[in-house]
Image: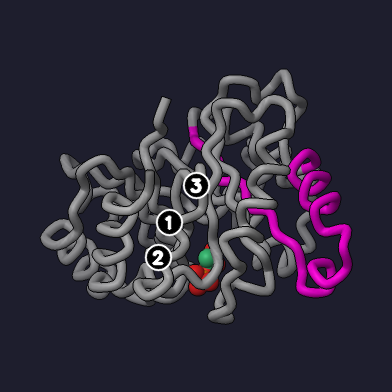
């Protein structure tokens, strides 16, 4: 069965203040065409509530960019899964390479966050990706399979669950360099062979923009894209969303 395409917008810390965030959301509501497409906006924690309020009664979902790896009450400076579900957040980006690197976050920690997300009915968007160094060696496929398996709870904990795997090569994020269709297909087909992921969606992320989206849409069996920088420009987001609906088989 054909899965609905998904466009995940990772706003990182690009949009700094409430008035700009609210303006972008108004523009999205006015301009972005939504037929047969799920859109997930992932603003910073501080803007989640405001975005949730503005998107009430509008068919765009919201996601957080991370969550706490524990559910206990004593977690100074953290945001719990239950707090983000409480404001209507349905998705969460986990294991983003910027977080893995900044927080020295291991795949085991990512797996425990995925488990907490699933327990709280949040759809985890689990990011995996190789460095340029690994890409240049020939064992990046083995690395990506291992990183994905290690970033997920045990197979019997994920079977039939809504999970999104985002293939985000580190050498592509924010660099303008995009792998070829064949390179993306090679990785997706390897990741799809991992047991327990038959219900998962697979998306590509890394320098997706309004100019390369038609080409990326040629990737067979791609369920969508995760877009960083370009997603903060509503005109570009509109072109990307249109292309996903028009071009993807
Ligand atoms: C990202 O950081 O998840 C990402 C895809 O960024 P960009 O599109 O800016 O490369």
For disc 1, the marked residue is: 217
- Vertical order, 51 against 190 (above or below): below
Separation (CA) of disc 1 from disc 2: 6 Å
Query: Horizontal and vertical percent for residue 5?
Result: 38, 43
- Vertical order, 70 against 30 (above or below): above
User: Are the two marked residues, 1 and 3, in contact with CB atoms closer than 8 angstroms?
Assistant: yes
In the displayed structure, does residue 179 sit left or right of residue 218? right
User: Are the two marked residues, 1 and 2, in contact with CB atoms closer than 8 angstroms?
Assistant: yes
Tell me if mark 2 has few (under 14), some (14-19) or many (20+) residues whose alpha carbon lies within 10 angstroms of its own. some
Query: Horizontal and vertical percent for residue 173?
Result: 59, 72
Number of the label disc, if any, that sits on residue 222? 3
Magenta span covers which residues? 122-150
Separation (CA) of disc 1 from disc 3: 7 Å
Image quadrant assignment for residue 102: bottom right
Q: Is mark 1 within 8 Å of ligand 1?
A: no
Q: Quadrant of the C terminus?
A: top left
Q: Residue at x 16, y 40 (%)?
A: 57
- Vertical order, 17 against 218 (above or below): below
For disc 2, the marked residue is: 213
């Amino acid at each position: 069965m054909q899965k609905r395409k998904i466009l995940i917008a990772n706003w990182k810390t690009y949009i700094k203040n409430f008035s700009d965030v609210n303006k972008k959301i108004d523009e999205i509501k006015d301009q972005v065409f939504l037929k047969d497409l799920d859109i997930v906006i992932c603003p910073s924690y501080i803007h989640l509530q405001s975005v949730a309020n503005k998107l009430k009664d509008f068919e765009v979902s919201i996601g957080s960019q991370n969550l706490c790896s524990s559910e206990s009450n004593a977690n100074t400076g953290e945001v719990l899964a239950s707090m983000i579900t409480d404001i209507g957040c349905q998705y969460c980006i986990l294991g983003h390479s910027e977080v893995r690197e900044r927080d020295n976050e291991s795949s085991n920690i990512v797996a425990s966050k995925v488990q907490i997300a699933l327990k709280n009915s949040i759809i985890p968007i689990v990011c995996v990706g190789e460095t340029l160094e690994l890409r240049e060696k020939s064992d990046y496929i083995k690395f990506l399979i291992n990183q994905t398996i290690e970033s997920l709870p045990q197979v019997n904990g994920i079977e039939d669950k809504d999970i999104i795997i985002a293939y985000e090569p580190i050498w592509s994020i924010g660099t303008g360099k995009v792998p070829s269709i064949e390179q993306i297909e090679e990785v997706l087909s390897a990741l799809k062979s991992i047991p327990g992921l038959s219900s998962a969606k697979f998306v590509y992320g890394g320098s997706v923009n309004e100019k390369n989206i038609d080409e990326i849409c040629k990737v067979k069996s791609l369920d969508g894209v995760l877009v960083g920088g370009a997603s903060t420009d509503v005109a570009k987001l509109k072109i990307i969303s249109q292309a996903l609906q028009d071009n993807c088989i």
